[in-house]
Image (tube, helix red, strand yellow):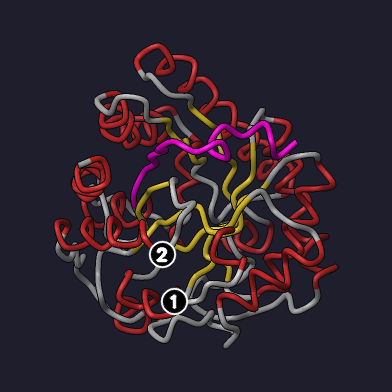
Amino acid sequence: MASALPQLAGGTFLSDGGLETSLVFLDKIELPHFAAFTLLDDELGRERLKSYYVPYLELCGETPGAGFILETPTWRASSDWATLLGVDAARLRALNTQAAQMMCAMRARWAPRLSGPIVVSGVIGPRGDGYIAEAPDSVDDAADYHHQQAEALAAGGVDMLAAVTMTTSAEALGISMAAQRVGLPVAISFTVEMDGRLPSGETLGDAIERVDASTPPAYFAINCAHPTHFEHALTSSAPWIRRIQGLRANASTKSHAELDESTELDIGDPTDLAQRYRGLKSVLPRLNVLGGCCGTDWRHLRAVRDAWVS
Protein backbone atom coordinates (compact mmCIF):
# COMPACT_ATOMS: atom_id res chain seq x y z
CA MET A 1 0.00 0.00 0.00
CA ALA A 2 2.73 2.49 0.99
CA SER A 3 4.62 1.87 -2.25
CA ALA A 4 1.79 3.59 -4.15
CA LEU A 5 2.64 6.97 -2.59
CA PRO A 6 4.40 9.02 -5.28
CA GLN A 7 6.58 10.92 -2.80
CA LEU A 8 8.39 7.67 -1.97
CA ALA A 9 9.84 7.65 -5.47
CA GLY A 10 11.61 10.97 -4.94
CA GLY A 11 11.05 14.37 -6.49
CA THR A 12 9.97 17.52 -4.68
CA PHE A 13 6.65 17.70 -2.84
CA LEU A 14 5.38 20.91 -1.28
CA SER A 15 2.66 21.31 1.32
CA ASP A 16 1.02 24.10 3.30
CA GLY A 17 2.21 26.02 6.37
CA GLY A 18 0.79 26.63 9.83
CA LEU A 19 -2.95 26.35 9.22
CA GLU A 20 -4.13 27.11 12.73
CA THR A 21 -1.69 29.96 13.44
CA SER A 22 -2.51 31.53 10.07
CA LEU A 23 -6.25 31.40 10.74
CA VAL A 24 -5.97 32.71 14.30
CA PHE A 25 -3.24 35.35 14.02
CA LEU A 26 -3.41 36.46 10.39
CA ASP A 27 -7.10 36.04 9.59
CA LYS A 28 -8.35 36.77 13.13
CA ILE A 29 -10.62 33.72 13.17
CA GLU A 30 -11.53 32.33 16.58
CA LEU A 31 -10.60 28.65 16.83
CA PRO A 32 -11.44 27.16 20.24
CA HIS A 33 -8.66 24.73 21.17
CA PHE A 34 -7.05 25.49 17.79
CA ALA A 35 -9.65 23.23 16.17
CA ALA A 36 -9.81 24.22 12.50
CA PHE A 37 -12.19 21.36 11.68
CA THR A 38 -15.03 23.30 13.34
CA LEU A 39 -15.02 25.61 10.29
CA LEU A 40 -16.45 22.74 8.26
CA ASP A 41 -19.80 23.29 9.96
CA ASP A 42 -20.97 26.04 7.59
CA GLU A 43 -20.39 27.22 4.03
CA LEU A 44 -18.51 30.37 5.07
CA GLY A 45 -16.09 28.32 7.13
CA ARG A 46 -15.58 25.78 4.36
CA GLU A 47 -14.83 28.51 1.84
CA ARG A 48 -12.35 30.08 4.25
CA LEU A 49 -10.56 26.77 4.61
CA LYS A 50 -10.43 26.24 0.85
CA SER A 51 -9.03 29.74 0.27
CA TYR A 52 -6.27 29.06 2.80
CA TYR A 53 -4.79 26.34 0.58
CA VAL A 54 -4.92 28.34 -2.67
CA PRO A 55 -1.60 30.27 -2.37
CA TYR A 56 0.25 27.03 -1.62
CA LEU A 57 -1.30 25.23 -4.58
CA GLU A 58 -0.50 28.20 -6.80
CA LEU A 59 3.11 28.09 -5.59
CA CYS A 60 3.30 24.41 -6.42
CA GLY A 61 1.82 25.08 -9.84
CA GLU A 62 4.69 27.50 -10.48
CA THR A 63 7.25 24.82 -9.58
CA PRO A 64 8.00 22.50 -12.52
CA GLY A 65 7.65 18.84 -11.61
CA ALA A 66 6.64 19.45 -7.98
CA GLY A 67 3.88 17.45 -6.33
CA PHE A 68 1.70 18.58 -3.44
CA ILE A 69 0.64 16.98 -0.15
CA LEU A 70 -2.88 18.29 0.53
CA GLU A 71 -3.50 17.88 4.27
CA THR A 72 -6.94 17.79 5.85
CA PRO A 73 -7.75 20.38 8.58
CA THR A 74 -8.36 17.63 11.14
CA TRP A 75 -5.48 17.94 13.62
CA ARG A 76 -7.94 18.35 16.53
CA ALA A 77 -10.69 16.13 15.12
CA SER A 78 -10.47 13.25 17.59
CA SER A 79 -12.91 12.31 20.31
CA ASP A 80 -11.37 13.90 23.42
CA TRP A 81 -11.05 17.27 21.70
CA ALA A 82 -14.52 16.90 20.18
CA THR A 83 -15.96 16.40 23.66
CA LEU A 84 -14.40 19.69 24.79
CA LEU A 85 -15.95 21.36 21.76
CA GLY A 86 -19.42 19.84 22.25
CA VAL A 87 -19.23 17.71 19.09
CA ASP A 88 -20.81 14.26 19.40
CA ALA A 89 -19.34 11.07 17.93
CA ALA A 90 -21.61 10.90 14.89
CA ARG A 91 -20.96 14.51 13.96
CA LEU A 92 -17.22 14.06 14.50
CA ARG A 93 -17.09 11.13 12.13
CA ALA A 94 -19.08 13.08 9.54
CA LEU A 95 -16.76 16.09 9.80
CA ASN A 96 -13.64 13.95 9.36
CA THR A 97 -15.14 12.31 6.29
CA GLN A 98 -16.31 15.69 4.99
CA ALA A 99 -12.81 17.14 5.41
CA ALA A 100 -11.34 14.29 3.37
CA GLN A 101 -13.97 14.66 0.67
CA MET A 102 -13.37 18.42 0.48
CA MET A 103 -9.65 17.87 -0.07
CA CYS A 104 -10.36 15.24 -2.73
CA ALA A 105 -12.60 17.73 -4.52
CA MET A 106 -9.87 20.35 -4.33
CA ARG A 107 -7.44 17.86 -5.84
CA ALA A 108 -9.78 17.27 -8.75
CA ARG A 109 -9.95 21.01 -9.44
CA TRP A 110 -6.24 21.70 -9.07
CA ALA A 111 -4.65 18.59 -10.57
CA PRO A 112 -4.74 19.96 -14.15
CA ARG A 113 -2.78 23.05 -13.02
CA LEU A 114 0.12 21.13 -11.43
CA SER A 115 2.79 19.16 -13.23
CA GLY A 116 3.25 16.77 -10.30
CA PRO A 117 0.75 14.61 -8.40
CA ILE A 118 -1.47 15.77 -5.52
CA VAL A 119 -1.62 13.39 -2.55
CA VAL A 120 -4.54 13.80 -0.13
CA SER A 121 -3.34 13.24 3.43
CA GLY A 122 -5.63 12.74 6.42
CA VAL A 123 -4.15 14.51 9.45
CA ILE A 124 -4.36 12.93 12.90
CA GLY A 125 -3.07 14.92 15.87
CA PRO A 126 -2.12 13.77 19.36
CA ARG A 127 -4.73 12.87 21.93
CA GLY A 128 -3.22 15.49 24.22
CA ASP A 129 -1.22 18.65 23.66
CA GLY A 130 1.25 18.79 20.78
CA TYR A 131 3.96 20.22 23.05
CA ILE A 132 3.61 17.88 26.04
CA ALA A 133 4.01 14.12 26.39
CA GLU A 134 0.55 13.10 27.59
CA ALA A 135 -1.70 10.01 27.52
CA PRO A 136 -2.10 7.48 26.07
CA ASP A 137 1.03 5.72 27.25
CA SER A 138 -0.19 2.34 25.99
CA VAL A 139 0.32 1.55 22.31
CA ASP A 140 -2.92 -0.45 22.25
CA ASP A 141 -4.85 2.40 23.87
CA ALA A 142 -3.49 4.80 21.26
CA ALA A 143 -4.42 2.46 18.41
CA ASP A 144 -7.96 2.04 19.75
CA TYR A 145 -8.41 5.77 20.38
CA HIS A 146 -7.23 6.92 16.94
CA HIS A 147 -8.91 4.14 14.95
CA GLN A 148 -12.23 5.98 14.74
CA GLN A 149 -10.68 9.04 13.11
CA ALA A 150 -8.49 6.93 10.81
CA GLU A 151 -11.57 5.04 9.66
CA ALA A 152 -13.56 8.22 9.00
CA LEU A 153 -10.73 9.79 6.99
CA ALA A 154 -10.33 6.58 5.01
CA ALA A 155 -14.06 6.63 4.24
CA GLY A 156 -13.62 10.14 2.85
CA GLY A 157 -11.08 8.94 0.31
CA VAL A 158 -7.66 10.06 1.58
CA ASP A 159 -4.58 8.47 0.01
CA MET A 160 -2.69 8.30 3.30
CA LEU A 161 -2.74 9.35 6.93
CA ALA A 162 -0.32 11.71 8.66
CA ALA A 163 0.24 11.56 12.41
CA VAL A 164 1.61 15.01 13.26
CA THR A 165 3.07 16.62 16.39
CA MET A 166 3.61 13.23 17.97
CA THR A 167 5.22 13.62 21.38
CA THR A 168 5.80 9.93 22.23
CA SER A 169 6.77 6.87 20.25
CA ALA A 170 3.94 4.94 21.96
CA GLU A 171 1.20 7.13 20.49
CA ALA A 172 2.96 7.26 17.12
CA LEU A 173 3.13 3.48 17.05
CA GLY A 174 -0.55 3.25 18.00
CA ILE A 175 -1.52 5.45 15.06
CA SER A 176 0.68 3.41 12.75
CA MET A 177 -1.26 0.34 13.90
CA ALA A 178 -4.59 2.14 13.37
CA ALA A 179 -3.52 3.07 9.85
CA GLN A 180 -2.63 -0.53 9.13
CA ARG A 181 -6.07 -1.63 10.33
CA VAL A 182 -7.83 0.69 7.86
CA GLY A 183 -5.45 -0.24 5.04
CA LEU A 184 -3.73 3.13 4.55
CA PRO A 185 -0.07 4.15 4.51
CA VAL A 186 0.90 6.68 7.18
CA ALA A 187 3.62 9.26 7.74
CA ILE A 188 4.71 9.74 11.35
CA SER A 189 5.87 13.25 12.27
CA PHE A 190 7.50 13.94 15.63
CA THR A 191 7.63 17.16 17.63
CA VAL A 192 11.05 17.83 19.15
CA GLU A 193 12.23 20.24 21.81
CA MET A 194 15.24 22.57 21.70
CA ASP A 195 17.49 19.68 22.72
CA GLY A 196 16.39 17.67 19.69
CA ARG A 197 14.49 15.13 21.82
CA LEU A 198 10.78 14.38 21.86
CA PRO A 199 8.78 15.92 24.73
CA SER A 200 8.78 12.38 26.19
CA GLY A 201 12.58 12.61 26.52
CA GLU A 202 13.17 10.00 23.81
CA THR A 203 15.79 10.72 21.20
CA LEU A 204 14.50 11.12 17.68
CA GLY A 205 16.48 8.09 16.55
CA ASP A 206 15.15 5.89 19.35
CA ALA A 207 11.55 6.90 18.60
CA ILE A 208 11.90 6.19 14.89
CA GLU A 209 13.58 2.85 15.53
CA ARG A 210 10.89 1.80 18.02
CA VAL A 211 8.05 2.48 15.59
CA ASP A 212 9.92 0.95 12.66
CA ALA A 213 10.64 -2.24 14.59
CA SER A 214 6.93 -2.95 15.10
CA THR A 215 4.66 -1.36 12.49
CA PRO A 216 6.74 0.62 9.99
CA PRO A 217 5.07 3.69 8.49
CA ALA A 218 5.65 4.86 4.92
CA TYR A 219 8.14 7.43 6.22
CA PHE A 220 8.87 9.80 9.09
CA ALA A 221 8.92 13.58 9.40
CA ILE A 222 9.80 16.33 11.87
CA ASN A 223 7.45 19.19 12.66
CA CYS A 224 6.60 21.96 15.12
CA ALA A 225 10.24 22.89 15.83
CA HIS A 226 12.74 25.28 14.28
CA PRO A 227 15.70 23.64 12.50
CA THR A 228 18.09 25.13 15.07
CA HIS A 229 16.38 22.88 17.64
CA PHE A 230 17.18 19.61 15.90
CA GLU A 231 20.00 20.13 13.39
CA HIS A 232 22.52 18.85 15.92
CA ALA A 233 20.50 15.64 16.41
CA LEU A 234 20.87 14.65 12.76
CA THR A 235 24.59 13.92 12.69
CA SER A 236 24.16 10.15 12.91
CA SER A 237 24.89 7.86 9.96
CA ALA A 238 22.43 5.28 11.35
CA PRO A 239 19.72 3.89 9.05
CA TRP A 240 16.95 5.87 10.80
CA ILE A 241 18.26 9.07 9.21
CA ARG A 242 17.20 7.78 5.78
CA ARG A 243 13.66 7.23 7.04
CA ILE A 244 13.04 10.98 7.42
CA GLN A 245 11.37 12.38 4.30
CA GLY A 246 9.26 15.24 5.61
CA LEU A 247 9.82 18.55 7.37
CA ARG A 248 7.30 21.09 8.63
CA ALA A 249 9.35 23.49 10.73
CA ASN A 250 8.20 26.34 12.95
CA ALA A 251 8.94 29.89 11.84
CA SER A 252 10.16 30.96 15.28
CA THR A 253 13.30 29.94 17.13
CA LYS A 254 11.41 30.28 20.43
CA SER A 255 10.82 27.30 22.70
CA HIS A 256 7.39 25.69 22.91
CA ALA A 257 6.92 27.23 26.36
CA GLU A 258 7.66 30.69 24.97
CA LEU A 259 5.31 30.17 22.03
CA ASP A 260 2.53 29.05 24.38
CA GLU A 261 2.80 32.38 26.20
CA SER A 262 2.96 34.51 23.05
CA THR A 263 0.06 36.80 22.21
CA GLU A 264 1.54 37.83 18.86
CA LEU A 265 2.68 35.72 15.93
CA ASP A 266 6.44 35.33 15.52
CA ILE A 267 7.06 34.77 11.81
CA GLY A 268 10.82 34.54 12.26
CA ASP A 269 13.10 35.04 9.25
CA PRO A 270 11.69 33.25 6.17
CA THR A 271 14.96 33.56 4.23
CA ASP A 272 17.04 32.08 7.04
CA LEU A 273 14.49 29.32 7.55
CA ALA A 274 14.63 28.47 3.85
CA GLN A 275 18.41 28.26 3.88
CA ARG A 276 18.25 25.89 6.85
CA TYR A 277 15.89 23.63 4.90
CA ARG A 278 18.37 23.65 2.04
CA GLY A 279 21.23 22.92 4.44
CA LEU A 280 19.46 19.75 5.59
CA LYS A 281 19.77 18.23 2.11
CA SER A 282 23.23 16.95 2.95
CA VAL A 283 22.22 15.24 6.20
CA LEU A 284 18.73 13.99 5.27
CA PRO A 285 19.29 12.33 1.88
CA ARG A 286 15.62 11.38 1.38
CA LEU A 287 14.05 14.66 2.51
CA ASN A 288 11.59 15.72 -0.20
CA VAL A 289 8.27 16.65 1.49
CA LEU A 290 8.45 20.32 2.46
CA GLY A 291 5.86 22.21 4.45
CA GLY A 292 5.62 24.51 7.45
CA CYS A 293 4.21 24.52 10.96
CA CYS A 294 3.49 27.19 13.59
CA GLY A 295 3.98 30.74 12.34
CA THR A 296 4.66 29.84 8.72
CA ASP A 297 2.53 30.89 5.76
CA TRP A 298 2.83 30.84 1.97
CA ARG A 299 5.66 33.40 2.10
CA HIS A 300 7.83 30.99 4.08
CA LEU A 301 7.02 28.17 1.69
CA ARG A 302 7.88 30.34 -1.29
CA ALA A 303 11.28 31.06 0.26
CA VAL A 304 11.76 27.36 1.00
CA ARG A 305 10.83 26.44 -2.57
CA ASP A 306 13.21 29.03 -4.01
CA ALA A 307 16.10 27.84 -1.84
CA TRP A 308 15.37 24.16 -2.45
CA VAL A 309 15.24 24.27 -6.25
CA SER A 310 18.03 26.84 -6.77
The residue to which callout 2 is attached is 283
Query: Residues in magenta?
Result: 1-17
Residue 78 in the image: state x and y as whole percent: 65, 55
**Outermost residue, front side:** 237
Q: Secondary structure at mark 1?
A: loop
- Image quadrant assignment for residue 60: top left
| Up-down relation of residue 253 to residue 148 (above or below) | below
The residue to which callout 1 is attached is 235
**Front in this rendered view, residue 185 or 206:** 206
Task: Locate residue 228 relative to residue 161 in the image: left or right.
Answer: left
**Front in this rendered view, residue 100 or 223:** 223
- Image quadrant assignment for residue 243: bottom right
Residue 33 in the image: state x and y as whole percent: 46, 63
Q: Give me the residue at 54% from left, 79% from top.
A: 198
Q: Give me the residue at 60% from left, 67% from top.
A: 240
**Kind of residue indicated by mark 2:** Val
**Front in this rendered view, residue 203 or 10:** 10
**Kind of residue indicated by mark 1:** Thr
